[in-house]
Amino acid sequence: MREAETHLEHLAITRTTVTSLADRLAAAAPDLPEHPDYPRILAAFNHATGPIRARDVCQALGPELLPKNVEGTRAKLKRLVRLGILIEADTGSFARKP
């Protein structure tokens, strides 16, 4: 019985820790539109050393480099600029907000 009580105490401590960490992560993570490409787009910027063009982001995401795919990626990048997550460093070049 004592072992079960100890286990429950540990679970309560773990729950408190996980809950506080989840609250911090939710506050730090930007509100992204609900589409699986947005986290992947931001991941491409995590590895970048400077501004990236829509074509390069599109290539990192994996679809064929067709004009419609590049334009779709550009539209997503522009949306991230409007949300204040990215900046348009130069015409057609995007970067993480400093």
Image (tube, rainbow, N blue to C red):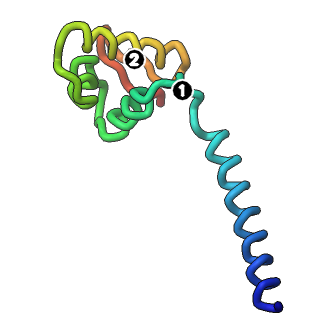
Query: In the rendered image of this protein, does residue 11 appear above or below residue 24?
Result: below
* Residue 18 at x, y percent in the picture: 68, 59
* Residue 95 at x, y percent in the picture: 37, 25
**Looking at the rendering, which quadrant does residue 53 occupy?**
top left
Residue occupied by mark 1: 32
Residue occupied by mark 2: 77
Q: How many marks?
A: 2
**Looking at the rendering, which quadrant does residue 43 occupy?**
top left
Query: In the rendered image of this protein, does residue 91 appear above or below residue 16?
Result: above
Closer to the camera in the image, 1 or 40: 1
Image quadrant holding the N terminus, namely bottom right
Amino acid type, label 2: Leu
- The residue that appears at 45% across and 23% down in the rendered structure is 86
Question: Could you classify mark 1 by the number of other residues whose Cα lies within 10 Å: few (under 14), some (14-19), or many (20 or more)?
Answer: some
Residue farthest to the left, as pictured: 65
- The residue that appears at 31% across and 40% down in the rendered structure is 47
- The residue that appears at 33% across and 16% down in the rendered structure is 73
Residue farthest to the front, as pictured: 1
From the viewer's perspective, tell me whether residue 80 is left or right of residue 69.
Answer: right
